[in-house]
Amino acid sequence: MKLERLSDRIIRAEFDGNIDLADYASSAPANNFIRNWDEDDFFGGTFDDAIRQAKTGNPEFANPLFEGISVLEAMIEEEKTGEIRDVTGEYFDVADFLSGEPEVFRRDEIGLQKPVVPVYANIGVNCGVDAKTITNRGSAVVALCDELQKNGFIVDIHAVCSLSYNGSEYHSVIKMANDPIDIDALAFSLANPLCFRRLILTALELYTGRESCQDQAYGRPSEYDLPDLFDTGLSGFYFVSSNHSEFRSDNYRTLESAKAHILGMVEQFKESASQIILG
């Protein structure tokens, strides 16, 4: 885990996957509040469940919701990969022939380029969002990433969480392999309430050096680098925290409604791929 202070009021932690996050959370004192809070329906399980599942992943949350649907397939275009030098080819290089170069023929090789689609998933939610909504939303995002990957895209996935607490911003980033994506690990990060509510909130206790952050209800979810992303001109999908105006719990009340909502985001992206679609 890499912890750095970007300014007086901005702290950023980067975890090398779920296991690194679980190991960090495990270092919290045994009497810390989140480790012992027994509302398992709210959290999705116990602290020990969170540690175990962070290591195994959650294949049960990785549903092929978009199988058979051509997601963004039209964006895959043939692009020239470069000029190939050989002893045979499509055309002849006179200068190389006169210089004695044996590979005097050239050909242009065409191939499919893997487009990169950035996906930012902010897992921060407030206490009014139930565990099932978290799971439905996360499962649908995982399914989108899986289907994009199957269609030849490289998914630049960012699992993030930002919390405003006691006048400071705490950014947590879980690094994810993206070529290929570890779908089971991604499902834990995005679809399992234990990741945010047990591990990230325990991490907040460690960032602040507190046994409990209940004095401010463990802070307020906020957006990770969203204004900066708009300034860079990047495109892709950004799944916002529950405090953002674009977030609607009803969109993720069921797995089918989550699927329908994300397909709507895909249609927006197909209309103009040079934008960030919020959802």
Image: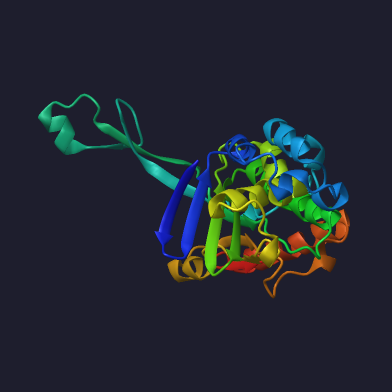
Task: From the viewer's side, name the closer residue of 227 and 91.
Answer: 227
Q: Is residue 71 visible to us here?
A: yes
For the point 70% across and 61% down, the residue is 214
User: Up-down: is 16 above or below 251?
Assistant: above
Where in the figure is residue 243, as x and y percent of width and height? 69, 70
For the point 67% across and 37% down, the residue is 185
User: Up-down: is 163 above or below 51?
Assistant: below
Task: From the viewer's side, name the closer residue of 77 and 89.
Answer: 77
Task: From the viewer's side, name the closer residue of 53 and 118.
Answer: 53
Drawn side of residue 178 relative to residue 147, left or right: left
Where in the figure is residue 125, as x and y percent of width and height? 72, 61
Drawn side of residue 240 relative to residue 254, left or right: left
For the point 49% across and 54% down, the residue is 12
Where in the figure is residue 81, as x and y percent of width and height? 41, 42
Drawn side of residue 16 relative to residue 60, left or right: left
Furthest toward the bottom, the residue is 245
Where in the figure is residue 46, as x and y percent of width and height? 80, 41
Task: From the viewer's side, name the closer residue of 33 and 136.
Answer: 33
Drawn side of residue 223 relative to residue 84, left or right: right
Q: Which quadrant of the view contains residue 7?
A: bottom left
Count the marks: 0
Colouring convention used in this rendered image of the protein: rainbow
Q: Is residue 274 visible to us here?
A: no
Q: Which quadrant of the view contains residue 90?
A: top left
For the point 73% across and 44% down, the residue is 35
Rendered-image quadrant of the C terminus: bottom right
